[in-house]
Image: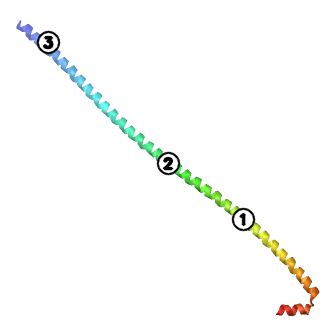
């Protein structure tokens, strides 16, 4: 009977050892699973941080592009205004030039008319004496 108790005790010890090995094996598997989950979670956090970094960079670049476009638009408007101002000044200059030419022609015509009238009224000697004074 004692022999049977020892055998039962040994059988229970074997079952305990097997059960203990299974528990250790499961604990190791669980530990590995937790490490893997923690690693994946860290990776996820890193990827999210990286995504946010690139998104911020993208947004900053978009803002910079928008600001550059705004400045470029303003410069274009100023350029168009300057071109219009140049065109207006050129037209004004052309008008002034044409007006001056007309005035010179009219004055030349009037001088010739007055010289003709003067030559009718006075002799050459009288005209020369007036010019000398």
Residue shown at 33% from the left, 34% from the top = 41
Disc 3 element: helix
In which image quadrant can residue 77 be found? bottom right
Residue occupied by mark 3: 11
Residue shown at 77% from the left, 70% from the top = 97
Q: CA distance from mark 2 to mark 3?
A: 76 Å
Residue 133: x and y, percent? Answer: 82, 93
Which mark is nearer the camera, 1 or 2? 1
Residue shown at 40% from the left, 41% from the top = 50
Residue 44, compared with residue 58, is above or below; it is: above
Residue occupied by mark 1: 90
Point out the tag, 1 or 3, that comes first from the N-terminus.
3
Q: CA distance from mark 1 to mark 2?
A: 40 Å
Marks 1,2: beta carbons within 8 A: no
Residue farthest along the left direction in this orientation: 2
Q: Nearer the viewer, residue 48 or 64?
A: 64
Residue 112: x and y, percent? Answer: 88, 80
Q: Nearer the viewer, residue 42 or 92?
A: 92
Residue farthest along the top direction in this orientation: 1
Residue 107: x and y, percent? Answer: 83, 77
Point out the tag, 2 or 3, that comes first from the N-terminus.
3
Residue occupied by mark 2: 63
Residue 30, compared with residue 2, is above or below; it is: below
Residue 39: x and y, percent? Answer: 32, 34
């Amino acid at each position: 009977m004692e022999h049977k108790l020892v055998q039962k005790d040994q059988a229970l010890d074997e079952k305990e050892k097997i059960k203990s090995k299974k528990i250790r094996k499961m604990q190791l598997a669980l530990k590995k699973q937790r490490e893997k989950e923690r690693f994946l979670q860290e990776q996820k956090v890193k990827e999210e941080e990286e995504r946010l970094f690139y998104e911020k960079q993208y947004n900053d670049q978009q803002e910079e592009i928008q600001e550059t476009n705004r400045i470029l638009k303003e410069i274009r408007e100023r350029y168009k205004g300057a071109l219009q101002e140049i065109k207006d000044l050129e037209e004004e200059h052309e008008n002034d030039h044409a007006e001056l030419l007309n005035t010179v022609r009219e004055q030349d015509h009037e001088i010739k008319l007055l010289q003709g009238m003067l030559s009718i009224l006075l002799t050459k000697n009288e005209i020369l004496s007036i010019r000398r004074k």
